[in-house]
Amino acid sequence: MDRRRFSRNMALLGAAAALSPFGVARAQAQKLKVGVILPRSGYLGFIGQSCQKGADLAPGVIKEMLGVDLELMNADFESNVDTARTRAERLIQEGAHVLVGPFDSGAAAAIAQVAEQRGVPLVINIAAAPQITEQGYKFVFRNFQTAGDIVRNGLDLIGELFQATSTVPRSAVYMHVNDTFGQAMSKGIHALLPMRTQLPFKIVDDIGYDPAAKDLSVEVSKAKAANADFLLLVCRLNDSIILRREMVKQRWQPMGIVSPGSPGMYEEQYFKTLGKLSEFSISNVPWYNPNAKLTKLVERAFKKANPNDNLVFHGLNAGFTFEAILIAADAFKRASSTDPKTLADAIRQTNITEKMTLGGPIKFNAKGQVEGIGSACVQNLHMLPSVVLPKDAATAKPVFPVPGYKKA
Amino acid sequence: MPALDLVANVVVSGILTGLVYGLMALGLSVIFGVVRVVNFAHGEMMTIAMYAATVLFAALKLDPFLAMLPVAAAFFVFGYALQAGLINPFITRPEHSQFMLLVAVAIILVNAMLMLFGPDARNVQVDYQLDSYELGPVLVDKARLFAAIAALVAAAGLFAFFRYTLTGKAIRACADNYLGARVVGLNVKHLYSLTFGLGAACVAIAGCAMVLLVDVTPPLGPSYTLLAFVIVIVGGLGSMAGALLGGVLIGVSEALAGLFIAPSAKSMFSFGLLIIVLLLRPQGLLGKRA
């Protein structure tokens, strides 16, 4: 063998070796590596940990359901969008075949860019900003309502709530976090509310605030001064706790606190921290179906893994995170490959009818968005988030206006 | 235009919070005024004091106001040891060395807190935390009022110490003339350590008060360090009265900015105030011209 041929053969060998982890070996993998990226610390930490509970159940339950082996690669993005981007990069470098997460819209937008550039599928568990699936991305999929859908369903449920309780509030003060999610929700509310003629109230003040705020006394003073009948709130978890405490300090008792679709007030930490003050808060949110067959399966696994915990506090977070991993696993099973493009094509063809959350089957439209996900009106009653509307899924009757608070 | 009672409520809340901010910044100002070292771990130290208050509350049901004494004593010892063991050798070194030293201390403290307490927020829940006094149209948050009173008492104690005790006068002498203090036989290094201990005790009291107003997480420290800098620069670096005044000004201006402009513009407004003070009176409102 002459020197030139030897060099050429070595170059070919090198190229084959270099490509093998990304090509041949990857396509024939027996195990799907799922990069789960969540905010397990920082101001979204509690919700991130709640989502993680759903992810942790997935390998066992999905193995039982589909016979597919999953390996979770967990990453905490510390409630920081820049960290989310770098964590996503690292997960891909370390061999993740698909990314799942991240609960937050700002982080989802950042991770979506990375996923698209690197050609690795991202299945979004929870994030509502509509623009994420409006960019023409080929590797980004979302099994969660967009802000527009959340608001539409949330406002309709507010109408049903007023009807069910025979109340006619005339005014609302609207308070919202001013992050990507909060702004998307605000846009939706201001666009859709005037069209909902069945809703009798007008927004008399619009107060945005920092989701990482440590003190909301000024914001609550301002809201109280608006003298509105009820508080329409788009919040996160920590701020909703600070806000509720501040309302009590400032002796502000509107007819109720109603979220047209945001996290926070149905979370376990809200109940734990506020005690009885958590009672009667209302959230109109995408929710899980407690009677679904898959829910029962997940509930069993959840109880086994978290004997002192109750799925009802994690239903939304854990449910949508579990379903996101299920989507990836189902696609992997059909594609029999971890090749990113093949996986993305398989995800696009998803049709899962046995699901945990409310609404129709999991099917992606051309933009990578699942349509027809249902919402429920969830009110905190007897220290548990309880479905009060729609009537066919309700486990309790709605209470509105809410009784005055007592010291927790 | 917001109603007058709303403005009054917001201003009162701003003053009370500002006094606690002021006490926190007072510690920074005292340390810089005497030792001439800028404590970049100041906010982190306050965060540790907040955690100490939550731990004492969880373990012994000790009210944060009662916890102020043991926590301040522990912080005094910690501050003294930190100055004597770590910072004193750096006194004559270039400023960038001192800067890096204290930034390193800050990073170590944040990571130690993360390891010890995790990333989750903690708080204390005392009986009076959600109560308020009604003074005509003004509602005064009980916990905030008590915290402000504690800040005033601690600040008054510190003023009295520096003005009326021999040790306090000796410390002031060190601050005025380092060489002169050594010539007359003062143990300057010991006095520096005492000063750092006192500054740390101030932060401890501020932390115990603050834990009644906000939940504590390890990453809280840097934002408080920054806030303390803004306050002492506005009030005048090295001026004790200036620190309190700066705290109140920042507290009130943030509250009013939240009311009149937008709640999310609160921090922007305090930094705007900082720039104006730096342009018009670089030594701060009550600071002495160098």
Image (tube, coloured by chain):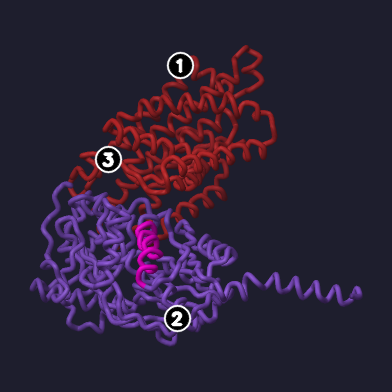
Q: What is the letter of the purple chain?
A: A
In front: label 3 or label 1: 3
The reply to whether the magenta stretch includes residue B41 is: no
Q: Residues within 10 Å of mark 3 (few under 14, many from 20)?
A: many
Q: Position of residue A347 (x, y in %)?
A: 45, 80
What residue sits 32% from the left and 43% below the top?
B123
Give me the chain letter of mark 2. Answer: A
Q: What segment is highlighted magenta in the picture?
A: A47-65
Q: Is residue A290 left or right of residue A347?
A: left
The residue that label 2 is drawn on is A334
Which structural element holds mark 1? loop
Give me the chain letter of mark 3. Answer: B
What residue sits 51% from the left and 82% below the top?
A138
Q: Are discs 2 and 1 both within one chain?
A: no
Q: Is residue A187 at least partly visible in the picture?
A: no
- What is chain B's hue in the picture? red
Give above or below for B17 relative to B36: below
Residue type, mark 2 in image: Arg
Q: Position of residue B257 (x, y in %)?
A: 39, 56
Which structural element holds mark 2? helix
What residue sits 51% from the left and 31% below the top?
B30
The residue that label 3 is drawn on is B143
Q: Quadrant location of the N terminus of chain A?
A: bottom right
Tell me the chief SS of the magenta region. helix
Residue type, mark 1 in image: Thr
